[in-house]
Amino acid sequence: MSLLNKAKLRGTSDSVSVKDAYGKLVLICLGGTALMLVFQLGLIIGIFQVGNKPPPTLVQLANGDSIGVTPIDSAERTDESILTFLNDIFSLTFTWAGTMQDPNQPGQIIVDPGVDVSDENGQRIGKVPTTVWSASLAMELNFRQEFLRQIAELVPQSVFTQKTNVAFVPVSFSPPEQVSEGRWKVRLVSNLLFLKDLGTVAEVVPYNVDIYVRSVVPPNSQLINNLSQPSDHKDPKNFPTLAQQVAEIRQAALEIDSIIPYRREDLN
């Protein structure tokens, strides 16, 4: 066989080898593409199954108790939860007895020393009952400061000597009216009863307001317990930490950002 023929045969063999290599590469690519399609199809099917799965209506707590739940959007709150939150906060805010629960001995009552409130310049303008200060943690920060100043001017100092008690008497809370996404208005009609030493009613003060409340992210109770700092009371050992108080008051995931007074005549 001549050298020319050998060269032709070698060239033909090399050409066949290259074609085989390209063919194998194409088959590998097609196989990989097919596997990717199968994987994506399985992923889509899984997403549809999760999307069509009904949301859970029963949740088990860490202590083993089970509670029923209602699925809602993260910015939504039920009317019942809003009204319960407002009733609890306003009862704490406007019930002044000059006493408080002893945090060291549950069930025991001690004299309430109150919490000092200062104006914008740092000058003391009075003090509010401890329950008022705690309830104000459920309010938007800037509004909270102004609200505490207003309450400090309203609270009689005789409350702290237990010569005057004040009771909050709600007449009605209107159904929550949504004013924007995650924000509602509730109209409160109520009275504040000022009681003297013998429990006689000395004065009845109408307290009628429009309350604006909005949804907020609930606190992480476990994280707060781990990272909490002492509160600003005189003896932090005798009180729950500030972070723990915030977690308890704000566990409803709601916040009051405005309170606007109105007259009863406005109802007519």
Image: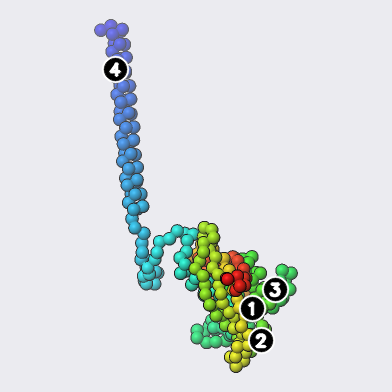
Residue behind mark 3: 118
Crowding near pointer 1: few (<14 within 10 Å), some, many (20+)? many
Q: Residue 147: horizontal and vertical position, in percent?
A: 64, 71
- The CA span between labels 1 and 4 is 98 Å
Residue behind mark 1: 128
Pointers 2 and 4 in contact (C-beta within 8 Å): no
- The CA span between labels 2 and 4 is 110 Å
Crowding near pointer 4: few (<14 within 10 Å), some, many (20+)? few
Horizontal arrangement in the rendering, residue 258 relative to residue 14 (left or right)? right
Residue 233 shows in the view: yes
**Residue occupying the point 33% across, 55% down:** 53
Residue behind mark 4: 13
Disc with the residue nearer the chain's start (1 vs 4): 4
Pointers 1 and 4 in contact (C-beta within 8 Å): no
Disc with the residue nearer the chain's start (4 vs 3): 4
Name the residue type under label 1. Val
| Location of residue 120 (image quadrant) | bottom right
Callout 4 secondary element: helix
Residue 247 shows in the view: no
Residue behind mark 2: 158
Disc with the residue nearer the chain's start (2 vs 4): 4
Q: Residue 193: horizontal and vertical position, in percent?
A: 59, 83
- The CA span between labels 1 and 2 is 12 Å
